[in-house]
Image: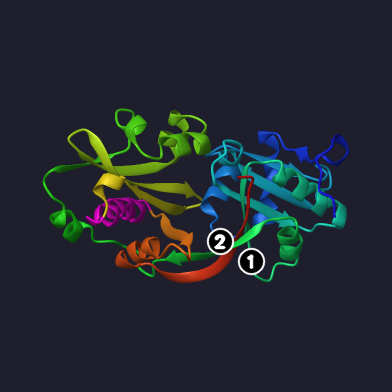
Amino acid sequence: MEYSLTEENELEMLNSDEYEIAKPFFDGFNTYASILHSILEKRSVGTIFTDDKSNPSFVLVCSSSVIANLNAPVYLGGKLDQDSLKKVIAYLKSLPKVSLVAFSDWEFRLSFEEAGFKPIDRLQLRRPFGFFNVDTLKKSLSHQYLVDKVNSENFSQCNWYSYLLSLYGDSDRFFNNGMGFCLIDQGKVAAESYGFIAKDTAEIGVITDKNYRNQNLGTIVSAFMLDYCYKNDIEPYWNCDISNPASAIVAKKLGFEENCRYLFLRWNVS
């Protein structure tokens, strides 16, 4: 099957004041969903397409990080006929990197794989508890590290600075709608953890500078993010590739348990 992008098979893009059109397609959707709902709520930036604004049968939600050549999730909701399927695949293959959230038994999985998308096994974890005691981990932190919120003074030094700007569009939108904590060693950001927040949930992300790994810093800084979530009635989730057991180990140290398995159908030009 040929998947080429032409004017004739272009999708209709929603304006931001039309995002209500897309929301019913994702009612009850809660798999790697915080970034999705953040876009739908206009807390972060993205692009939403459909086949027909007046009578939509599906919507495609793309994080702006996809356009910025960064791996970020893409979501597809609704019913597709073969013509719509060809349009969606053609558009996604015009992008440098795509991670389409799907389930193993999804009816269109084979069509995407035949078009060159690679299935990546994923794991979602959640905590069965409604609180987190951060004090023990605080005590284990060496006095050389300062714990700070990600703010205007340290944001540009963070490892995920460019990624977060691509998700939120600008730093003010991140400060207003997201949250992050970092560990600082003599002015250098050693580890950072973020909450991508929407609909009273947060996707927890963590990264440790390569020079500070194997010191439990990722676990410690994520503990501060969890503490923030529970103090603000936000339910945290943790997602990772199954091929990345180190991430799952950190999550389980923090009390997360497996919630579900799913796929990224990944397209990567390189």
**In the rendered image, the vertical position of residue 187 relative to residue 123, given as above or below:** above
Determine whether, in the image, residue 27 is placed left or right of residue 186: right
Q: Position of residue 49 (x, y in %)?
A: 73, 42
Q: In front: 120, or 73?
A: 120
The residue where tag 2 is placed is 31
Compare marks 1 and 2 and give the one earlier in the sequence: 2
Magenta residue span: 214-232
Q: Secondary structure at mark 1?
A: loop
Residue drawn at x 41%, y 58% is 236
Q: Position of residue 252 (x, y in %)?
A: 34, 68
Q: Secondary structure at mark 2?
A: loop
- Determine which quarter of the picture holds residue 266: bottom right
Q: Position of residue 186 (x, y in %)?
A: 17, 35
Main secondary structure along the magenta-highlighted residues? helix
Asked whether the beta carbons under mark 1 and mark 2 sit within 8 Å of each other, the answer is: yes
Determine whether, in the image, residue 63 is placed left or right of residue 51: left
The residue type indicated by label 1 comes to Phe
| Residue 127 visible in this rendered orientation of the protein | yes
The residue type indicated by label 2 comes to Thr
List the single residue furthest toward the left. Answer: 143
Instruction: Indicate which disc residue 103 carries.
Output: 1
